[in-house]
Image: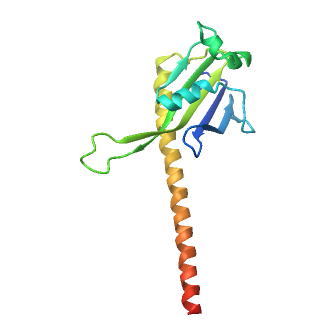
Amino acid sequence: IDVAGAERGFIMLAAADQKTLEMKLARAKGRITMPGSTFGTSRNIPEEVFKTGELKIVADLLDGDLANVHMGTVALGIRHVACVPLRAVRFLDSAKQKEPEAENIGVLYLDSREKGSLLAPHTRTALDTLATEAGVAIENARLYRETLEKARIEHELKIAAEIQRALL
């Protein structure tokens, strides 16, 4: 938010169906966490970025035909938007793979009424770097939670096996 000069920032992650986005974190300028899980934002831009995996910066929603496409967003007073895909990179499993796999797991969305520095080259680089790091952190947290769940299940199975042996 500070780097881009935006007023608000949101992290939206893929829902269980891997097709829709769910709001996970919302912050306003001044590092203020916004309560709730639904906010007046553009839905078209984050969904497009999530599907295509391409960063999108809209300098002004009132330019050209964009106002017609994003009427709801413009009605909220939002004119400037930056949206970056969050990716989980799965590294090479074998030497036969040519590139690591990258899966879109969500988006980082910023918006503002004022232009700020959304169009500056350093903003694009900073947002891309931040999105990469956030994607890695989110994927690591998911893998850690998955590991804890597997350990819990293994522990419960071990206890069940001991009970079964005791009964036999």
Q: Residue at x 55, y 74 (%)?
A: 155
Q: In which quarter of the image is the N terminus?
A: top right
- The total of numbered circles placed on residues is 0
Residue 41's quadrant in the figure? top right
Height in image: 21 above or below 115? below
Q: Is residue 4 visible?
A: no
Q: Which of 161 and 19 is in front in this view?
A: 19
Q: Which residue is drawn at 46% across and 26% down?
A: 54
Residue plotted at (49% across, 50% down): 140
Residue 19 in percent (x, y) is at 56, 38
Q: In the displayed structure, does residue 101 sit left or right of residue 166?
A: left
70 is higher (above) or lower (below) than 9: above
Query: Looking at the figure, which quarter contains the C terminus?
Result: bottom right
User: Which residue reaches farthest left?
Assistant: 96
Q: Which colour scheme is used?
A: rainbow
Residue at 73% across, 19% down: 76
Q: Nearer the viewer, residue 155 or 113?
A: 155
Picture quarter containing residue 71? top right
Q: Which percent across, then down, holds residue 86? A: 50, 36
Looking at the image, is 120 positioned above or below residue 23?
above
Name the outermost residue toward the top.
64
| Left or right: residue 30 compared with residue 11 | right
Q: Is any atom of residue 58 visible in this view?
A: yes
Give the image location of residue 69, x and y in percent.
63, 15
Q: Position of residue 87 (x, y in %)?
A: 47, 38
